[in-house]
């Protein structure tokens, strides 16, 4: 029954992919860094859905105590789980292997897609129907592979390593985004002062202060609730206290220096508070975790829904052009410079076709207009057509796949606590989230103190 449901779901998703994602562009149009992003993230969504169906649908149906038709599947999905004495732990072990099957299929697909896009820049937007068929075949084949040693030993450790890299990258990106957000709003305030007159930029500055007040107030209120509802054991109290203390220290250092901004401190503090909540809600100790819910229908729908939405948001937001190194288009350089306040660091050059090599004239800066607008050589056109960094999109999706594999299986640890309403509960998951929070806060503290510790170095 579980296999039938999975097959029907995959078939429906394939039809949805063909109708929603549109057709590919012509092959002579240069690809962007995010070429094929929608289709790729859709396959990530499909992989997450298959992982859930394998973990909570197929795995329970393939337990040894059930009257199964295909004995080979039962033996394959139970391989390595016999060492657990409890039937619940054996079921959890088998469910984890289902997630590893779906994630392994996605990881193989995105690695091959990255390789293809590296050697052929347009590969990310070609043959998506065949790619989808190949992706589904990988998932079907994975169902017939025994757990050991591929899934239970090799893939789970690959997922752990990839997830650690993703967490590290995630924290760096967030601190950078917090800095750029403040710079963007200040630049808009300065622009309004110049274009609309004195005092016109105050609306942006007041908005900054208002947003800071909301973030700081919300963080303090949430921390108060965390102390009240999750403070039943010492480890939770320690996590919450560290979040509060480091947040206050970071804000104080920022106010005493010029290395950051109030909005950056407020953003980092609020995100650290959110990570603290996620961490303490992963504690498998029911005495200090009221978020542990029973596996009733409502809690399962809420738990699965929140997990899928957060995973898909991560997959979509962290594959944006600015995350995978997409460069600003020349035609948009002026507008982007005005909106973000970030100076143009690259120069635009033009050459006159037909001139001698000694008469080649380079123009640096922003080219507003030119009478020789058709003067770019065919060689440069060929270089532009072949240049692409769209393979980085697939590398990022590989890391996200590793992250979702461990997020749905409590980092591969089989222990009492997690269920379909709380799929990521576990001590390892709790400590990994706490570690990522500490990493982000330490990175931000470093940006505040590095210039003071090493005044002879340039950290700009």
Image: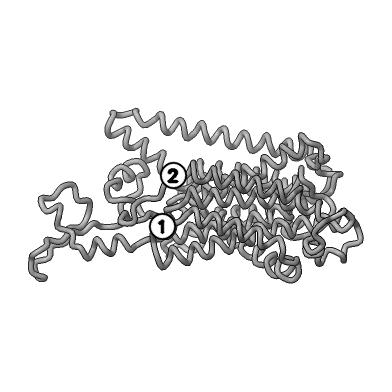
Which of the two discs, 2 and 1, labels the residue nearer the N terminus? 2
Classify 10 Å Cα crowding around label 1: few (below 14), some (14-19), many (20 and above). few
Cα distance in 3D space between marks 2 and 1: 43 Å
In the displayed structure, 114 sits above or below 269; it is below
Q: Which residue is mark 1?
A: 460
Q: How is the image coloured?
A: one colour
Question: With 184 as the anchor, is 166 left or right in this view?
Answer: right
Say left or right for 141 vs 122.
right
The residue at the far front in this view is 69
Residue 287, horizontal then vertical, whole percent: 86, 44
- Image coordinates of residue 326 in percent, x first then y, are 40, 55
Q: Residue at x 26, y 63 (%)?
A: 382
Q: From this viewpoint, is residue 157 visible?
A: yes
Q: Is residue 167 visible?
A: no
**Residue at which label 2 appears:** 22
Q: Looking at the image, is 399 positioned above or below residue 314?
A: below
- Residue 61, how many percent across, how many down? 81, 52
Closer to us: 147 or 460 = 147
């Amino acid at each position: 029954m579980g296999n039938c449901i999975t097959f029907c779901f995959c078939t429906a998703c394939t039809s949805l992919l063909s109708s929603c994602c549109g057709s590919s562009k012509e092959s002579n149009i240069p690809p962007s860094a995010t070429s094929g992003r929608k289709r790729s993230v859709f396959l990530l969504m499909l992989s997450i859905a298959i992982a859930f169906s394998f973990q909570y649908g197929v795995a329970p149906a393939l337990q040894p105590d059930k009257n199964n038709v295909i004995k080979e599947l039962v033996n394959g999905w139970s391989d390595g789980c016999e060492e657990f004495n409890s039937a619940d732990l054996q079921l959890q072990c088998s469910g984890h292997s289902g997630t590893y099957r779906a994630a392994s299929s996605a990881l193989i697909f995105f690695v091959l897609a990255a390789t293809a896009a590296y050697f052929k820049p347009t590969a990310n937007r070609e043959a998506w129907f065949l790619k989808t068929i190949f992706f589904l075949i990988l998932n079907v084949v994975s169902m017939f592979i025994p757990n050991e040693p591929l899934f239970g030993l090799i893939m789970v450790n690959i997922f752990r390593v990839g997830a650690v890299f993703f967490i590290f990258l995630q924290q760096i990106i967030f601190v950078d985004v917090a800095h750029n957000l403040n710079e963007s709003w200040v630049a808009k305030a300065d622009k309004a002062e110049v274009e609309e007159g004195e005092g016109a930029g105050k609306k942006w500055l007041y908005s900054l202060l208002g947003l800071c007040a909301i973030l700081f107030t919300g963080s303090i209120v949430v921390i108060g609730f965390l102390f009240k509802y999750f403070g039943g054991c010492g480890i939770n109290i320690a996590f919450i206290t560290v979040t509060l203390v480091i947040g206050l220290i970071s804000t104080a250092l920022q106010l005493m220096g010029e290395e950051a901004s109030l909005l950056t401190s407020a953003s980092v503090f609020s995100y650290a508070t959110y990570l603290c909540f996620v961490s303490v809600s992963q504690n498998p100790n029911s005495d200090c975790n009221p978020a542990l819910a029973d596996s009733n229908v409502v809690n399962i729908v809420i738990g699965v829904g929140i997990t899928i939405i957060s995973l898909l948001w991560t997959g979509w937001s962290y594959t944006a052009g600015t995350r995978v190194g997409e460069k600003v288009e020349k035609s948009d350089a002026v507008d982007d410079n005005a909106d973000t306040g970030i100076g143009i660091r690259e120069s635009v050059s033009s050459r006159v076709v037909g001139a001698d090599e000694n008469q080649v004239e380079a123009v640096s800066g922003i080219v507003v207009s030119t009478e020789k607008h058709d003067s770019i050589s065919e060689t440069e056109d060929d270089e532009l057509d072949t240049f692409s960094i769209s393979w980085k999109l697939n590398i990022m999706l590989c890391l996200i796949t590793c992250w979702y594999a461990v997020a749905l299986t409590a980092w591969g640890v089989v222990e009492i606590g997690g269920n379909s309403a709380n799929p990521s509960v576990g001590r390892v998951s709790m400590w990994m989230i706490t570690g990522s929070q500490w990493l982000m806060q330490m990175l931000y503290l470093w940006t505040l103190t590095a210039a003071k510790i090493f005044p002879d170095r340039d950290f700009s």
